[in-house]
Image: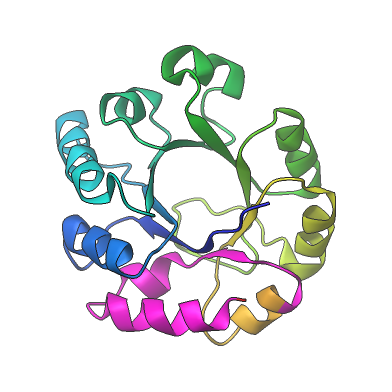
Amino acid sequence: MKNYGVYVILTKPMLPHTTIAEICVQNQVAMLQLREKEMSDRELLKIARDLRAITRGTTTSLVINDRPDIALLCQADYLHLGQDDLPVSEARKIVGPMKIGLSTHSLEQARQALAQEPDYIGFGPIFPTNAKAKPDPPVGTNQLEQVLAISDVPVVAIGGIFPENIGQVIAAGAQNIAMVRHFMQTTDFETNLKQIQKLIP
């Protein structure tokens, strides 16, 4: 099973989206997801295509959140779906064989997601978070350990993870970690990125 290490989610960054993408490529970040829920379709497609131009042919895979149409139009590597998005079977009718990841927020959701044979799953929030308007209840590291034990695909730990508690997430066995606020709410993204890359085994 290939693990990703740091999983970067682009959402309302303090730096330009393209600048972050360029830093991700330079630092060999495996997964870069575009998650912008308040943009117009036209603006979202433009940024997606700009990110595709930067990441194409590199070790950084481009992931588009929620939108199979945008993922197909920009020729992304992955589509990422949430619990309220299209089912995998329906999204497949749009994106074909494109790789797909699924968000999960409980052990039961993780089991149901794995039955759909995604390429990876997201699991969280591990800790309390306000990175989303309506966050799900925190699942904690015990549930994370249980999901890691049953998953045959990479599990991306997400939600409320910062330098001060990432050790607990790593100790639970996580090798794929997303940190939205720590990376997006700073103009010193590259320093923060390199710091976390050194911590993840």
Question: Quadrant where the C terminus lies?
Answer: bottom right
Residue placed at 50% from the left, 22% from the top?
Answer: 97
**Residue 128 in the image, given as x and y percentages of width and height:** 60, 68
**Residue 29 in the image, given as x and y percentages of width and height:** 40, 63
Quarter occupied by residue 177:
bottom right
Residue placed at 69% from the left, 31% from the top?
Answer: 117
Q: Is residue 191 left or right of residue 134?
A: left
Q: Nearer the viewer, residue 145 or 126?
A: 145
Q: Nearer the viewer, residue 86 or 153?
A: 153
Vertical relation: 91 (above or below) 188: above
**Residue 133 in the image, given as x and y percentages of width and height:** 44, 52
Vertical relation: 169 (above or below) 76: below
Quarter occupied by residue 2:
bottom right
Q: Is residue 70 left or right of residue 170?
A: left
| Residue that protrudes farthest toward the bottom in the picture | 164
- Please state the extent of the stretch shown in magenta in the rendering: 171-200
Residue placed at 54% from the left, 59% from the top?
Answer: 4
Q: Is residue 190 magenta?
A: yes
Vertical relation: 16 (above or below) 197: above
Q: Is residue 90 left or right of residue 13?
A: right
Q: Nearer the viewer, residue 81 or 52?
A: 52
| Residue that protrudes farthest toward the front in the picture | 57
Residue placed at 21% from the left, 30% from the top?
Answer: 41
**Residue 78 in the image, given as x and y percentages of width and height:** 45, 37
